[in-house]
């Protein structure tokens, strides 16, 4: 695949937002469209489609992938606004409102948070600020600090709250990981500031202020129903974020003194995962060079490969016995290699 064709393939990442906006503006069963599209239809398609493991050589300053990131800021905001507009105008009610919350949450996870992850790794203050806005729009106030300062440093060790332990279910991981990520982020900022309080220079506190600003804006426009819907949307989006963390590092172990390499992250070259999530699935290379733009990430010939794609593995991950059955034999081979 040429870099130009690959760049156009990234346009797949905009399809969830398209379904969300259409569903939220029309209500009823149409509000469920993106939930079915992203978690059912794409999961089935991904199961039967192949992989794209070629390393397309592209200039780091290729403008098209950068434009995709900025466009996602607009489409994610449009998705959220369509939800609140649908509530304000009475379009979304009952089962339609539930579908809208879940569908918007899926898009916020697959578009908003994923793009935020890419933007906060940039040097540009403007891009980082946009990334923080995307995170705050989903209610997330811990990821910015934890991911940049702790996760990349401690990944695949017991110190990292975002690394799932072998035998840990997604549900246990979600509760433990979020709690510990918040605690580790607050502690890290307290050490930097030299205080136990949260001054304005504290990054976690600033992220919380952004979240509160979003909450106030939602309440003013869409009322209590809008605020509750935003909370539900954010919870679902952040559950999907932690699902991604779960499958990206599940059961992998690294000695703290060992440099992070391609054996400390699960990667995936499935077409849907690559282009829907702007190459987040080439996760090993991201941890190898965290500042590397998403469109320049490569696939390694060796290293852990997920037994499916991000969309097709959601159901197995939700059923612990199934997840353990398909991943533990792969972990045994990885552990045997390490020994």
Image (cartoon, rainbow, N blue to C red):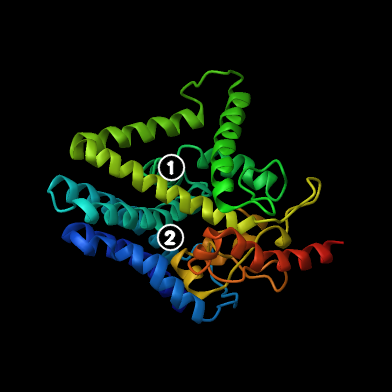
Q: Residue 192: name its quadrant.
A: top right
Q: Is residue 326 something that shows in the picture?
A: yes
Residue 296, percent across and down? Answer: 56, 66
Find the residue positioned furthest to the left: 89
Residue 75 lies, with reference to residue 269, above or below; the image says above
Mark drawn on residue 149: none
How packed mark 2 is, by other alpha carbons closer than 10 Å (few <14, some 14-19, many 20 or more), is some
Q: Residue at x 57, y 71 (%)?
A: 308
From this viewpoint, which residue is outermost toward the front?
A: 321
Q: Of marks 2 and 1, which one's residue comes earlier in the chain? A: 2
Query: Please, is residue 273 above or below residue 320 in the view?
Result: below
Question: Regarding mark 2 in the picture, which secondary structure is present there?
Answer: helix
Q: Residues within 10 Å of mark 1 (few under 14, many from 20)?
A: many
> What is the quadrant of the C terminus in the image?
bottom right
Q: Which residue is mark 2?
A: 66
Q: Residue 113: give x, y in percent of width and height.
A: 44, 51
Q: Nearer the viewer, residue 261 or 227?
A: 227
Instruction: Tell me the element at label 1.
Output: helix
């Amino acid at each position: 695949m040429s870099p130009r064709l690959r760049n156009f393939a990234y346009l797949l990442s905009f399809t969830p937002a398209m379904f969300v906006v259409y569903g939220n503006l029309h209500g009823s069963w149409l509000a469920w469209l993106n939930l079915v599209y992203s978690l059912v239809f794409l999961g089935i398609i991904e199961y039967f489609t192949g992989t794209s493991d070629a390393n397309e050589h592209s200039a780091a300053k290729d403008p098209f992938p950068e434009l995709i990131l900025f466009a996602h800021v607009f489409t994610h905001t449009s998705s959220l606004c369509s939800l609140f507009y649908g509530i304000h105008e009475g379009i979304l009610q009952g089962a339609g409102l539930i579908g809208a919350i879940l569908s918007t949450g899926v898009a916020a996870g697959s578009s908003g948070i994923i793009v935020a992850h890419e933007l906060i790794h940039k040097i540009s203050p403007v891009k980082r600020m946009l990334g923080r806005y995307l995170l705050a729009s989903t209610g997330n106030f811990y990821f910015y600090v934890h991911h940049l300062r702790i996760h990349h440093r401690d990944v695949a060790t017991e110190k990292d709250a975002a690394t799932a332990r072998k035998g840990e279910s997604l549900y246990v991981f979600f509760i433990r990981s979020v709690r510990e990520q918040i605690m580790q982020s607050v502690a890290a900022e307290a050490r930097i500031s030299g205080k136990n309080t949260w001054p304005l220079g504290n990054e976690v506190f600033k992220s919380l202020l952004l979240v509160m600003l979003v909450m106030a804006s939602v309440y003013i426009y869409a009322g209590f129903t809008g605020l509750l819907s935003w909370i539900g949307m954010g919870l679902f989006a952040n559950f999907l974020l932690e699902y991604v963390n779960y499958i990206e590092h599940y059961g992998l172990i690294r000695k703290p003194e060992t440099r992070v390499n391609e054996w400390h992250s699960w990667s995936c070259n499935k077409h849907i995962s690559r282009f829907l999530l702007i190459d987040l699935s080439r996760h090993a290379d991201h941890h190898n060079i965290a500042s590397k733009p998403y469109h320049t990430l490569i696939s390694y010939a060796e290293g852990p490969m997920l037994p499916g794609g991000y969309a097709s593995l959601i159901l197995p991950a939700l059923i612990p016995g199934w997840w353990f059955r398909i991943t533990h034999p792969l972990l045994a081979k990885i552990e045997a290699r390490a020994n």
